[in-house]
């Protein structure tokens, strides 16, 4: 059984994130969407809220689970007996940073393999930051995030 971990802030989850999760769920026996707890960041949604939002949109994926993690990602992978780390890539600039992180993770945990998965072209521009910016000005989030999350995000990001 191959377990993959897809880490991120998911503040909030976008259709780009869902694209990576859906495609990963077809490739691996088990996918763990791991929500980063980072005390140096000031997210819009709490970790528990981000987990709840992800669980709403991932309810139809039986081999996908969601949980929080803090500390070193490789320690989390070891604890979960995960084999693969999934990193979504939107642009070359993402790749440069993620490649460095992949090499670091491999140095810390030789059994860890990193899979770089390009986001589908319709989501290459999309980020959680862009979603929050659009929502803060009352713009339409249709097609950017799952429909069921739109009212939640709009309410939280309204100015």
Image: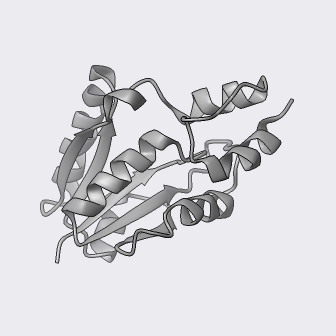
Q: Is residue 65 left or right of residue 142?
A: left
x, y percentage for residue 96? 26, 26
- Residue at image location 50% in from the left, 57% down from the top: 35
x, y percentage for residue 13? 55, 47
Scheme by which the image is coloured = one colour
Q: Quadrant of the N terminus?
A: bottom left
x, y percentage for residue 3? 24, 70
- Residue at image location 41% in from the left, 31% down from the top: 123
Decide: is 67 above or below 17.
Answer: below
In terms of image quadrants, where is residue 49?
bottom right
How many circles with numbers are drawn on the protein? 0
In terms of image quadrants, where is residue 136?
top right
- Residue at image location 53% in from the left, 48% down from the top: 10
In terms of image quadrants, where is residue 41?
top right
- Residue at image location 63% in from the left, 65% down from the top: 52
Considering every residue shown, the one lying at the far right of the view is 159
Decide: is 33 above or below 96.
Answer: below
x, y percentage for residue 11? 60, 45
Q: Quadrant of the C terminus?
A: top right
Q: Is residue 125 left or right of residue 52?
A: left
């Amino acid at each position: 059984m191959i377990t993959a971990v897809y880490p991120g802030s998911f503040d909030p989850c976008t259709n780009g994130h869902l694209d990576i999760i859906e495609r990963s769920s077809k490739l691996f026996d088990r996918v763990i969407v791991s929500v980063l707890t980072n005390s140096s960041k000031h997210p819009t949604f709490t970790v528990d809220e981000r987990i709840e939002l992800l669980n709403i949109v991932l309810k139809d994926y039986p081999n996908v689970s969601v949980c929080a993690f803090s500390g070193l990602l490789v320690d989390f992978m070891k604890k979960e007996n995960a084999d693969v780390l999934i990193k979504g890539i939107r642009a070359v600039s993402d790749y440069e940073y993620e490649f460095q992180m992949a090499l670091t993770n491999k140095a810390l945990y030789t059994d860890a393999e990193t899979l770089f998965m390009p986001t589908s072209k319709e989501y290459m521009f999309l980020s959680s930051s862009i979603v929050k910016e659009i929502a803060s000005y009352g713009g339409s989030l249709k097609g950017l995030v799952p429909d069921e999350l739109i009212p939640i995000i709009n309410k939280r990001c309204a100015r």
